[in-house]
Amino acid sequence: MSALMTTLVSGIVLGSLYALMASGLSLVWTTLGVFNFAHGALMMIAAFVAWTVAEPAGLGLWAGLLCGVGAAAFLGIVIEYLLVRPFYGRPNMLLITVMTTLAAMIIIEKSAQILWGPRLKQLPRLIDGDVSIFGAVISRHEALIVLIAPAVLVALWLFATRTATGRSLRAVGQNQDAAALLGINVPLTFALAFGLGAALAGLTGVLLGGIRFITPSLGVEPLVKAMIVVIFGGLGSLGATVGAAFVIGIAEAFLVLVIGLYWTPFMLFLGLIIVLIFRPNGLFGRA
C-alpha cells in the first residue's frame, strides 16, 4: 500500500510539471497554430540562468528563479520575432516553423554547452526537508511543485478569460483577420503568446532543476512528454492539456513501477496511438 501511495504521489508531481510545460506549448499552438520545438531548450536555459544567479553570483534561489523565467520569456519573444514572424501567412508556415524552431533548439543547446560546460549542475531546493503525504514521503520541494502548478494554471486561466489581453489571445487564435479588424495588434499578441509559453517552460525548468541535474539536454525528454500531453488531451484546450498531464504523469509513475523505466516510453506512445485511433481529437478533445 505504501508503494502504491508513493507511486501515486510521484505521478502527481510529474503531472504538475507536465501541466506547466505542456500548457505553454498548448498556448502557442492555440494562438499561432505552430509547435515550438525550442520549448524544451528554453526550459533548460532558465535552469542554467537560475543556477548562475543563485550559485556563482550568490544572489539566492528566488532571484535565480525570477531571472531564469525572465530569460526564458525574453528568449521566447526573440525566437518568435526572428524565426517565426517572418513566415506568417505563408501556406507552408507550419513546416517552416518546425524547422526554424528545431534549429533554435540545437543552437540554444550547443550554446549552453559552450557557456556552462559539460559538468553536471543542480539547483538548491526551494524548501529543504521532507513531508509525508498519506504515508508517502516526498521532499518539500516536490510538495511545493504540486501547490505551485495549480496556482499558476488557475492564474493563466483567469488571465485568458477575465482580462482584455487574455481575450485578445483567444480571439487571435480563433480568427486572426477578424481580430485585426477589431483593432487587436496581432503580431504583438503572437509575441505575448510565445513569451508566456516560454515563461511557463522556464518556471518548469527551475523547478525541475532542484530535482534533476541540469545539462544542455535537460529539456529534450520533457519536450517529448509535453507534446504527448498536448496531443493526448486534445489540441487547443488548456483544460484538456492539464487533465492529460496528470493522466500521463500518474500513468508513467505506475508504468515505471510495473514494467520498468526502459519500456515506459514505448507504452506511453502506444497508448497515445490507441487513443488517437479511437479519438482523433484527443482524449478530452471535442469532435
Image (spheres, helix red, strand yellow):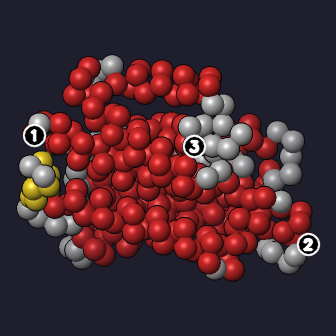
Q: Amino acid at mark 3?
A: Phe
Badge 3: how crowded within 10 Å, few (<14), some, or many (20+)? Answer: some
What kind of element bears circle 2?
helix
Q: Position of residue 5 (x, y in %)?
A: 17, 42
The three-letter amino acid code for the residue at tag 1 is Ser
Residue 39, how many percent across, how many down?
Answer: 52, 49
Q: Which residue is mark 1?
A: 2
Q: Which mark is residue 254?
A: none
Q: Which residue is mark 2?
A: 181
Where residue 60 sits, quadrant-wise, is bottom left
Q: Is residue 177 left or right of residue 108?
A: right
Q: Nearer the viewer, residue 221 or 80?
A: 221
Report how far apart the C-alphas of labels 2 and 1 lie in the structure.
59 Å
Residue 226 horizontal/vertical position (percent): 48, 43
- Where is 45 relative to 97, above or below? below
254 with respect to 170 (left or right): left
Q: Are marks 2 and 3 in contact (CB under 8 Å)?
A: no
Q: Residue at x 63, y 72 (%)?
A: 161
Residue 83 appears in the figure:
no
- According to the picture, the residue beneath numbered tag 3 turns out to be 284
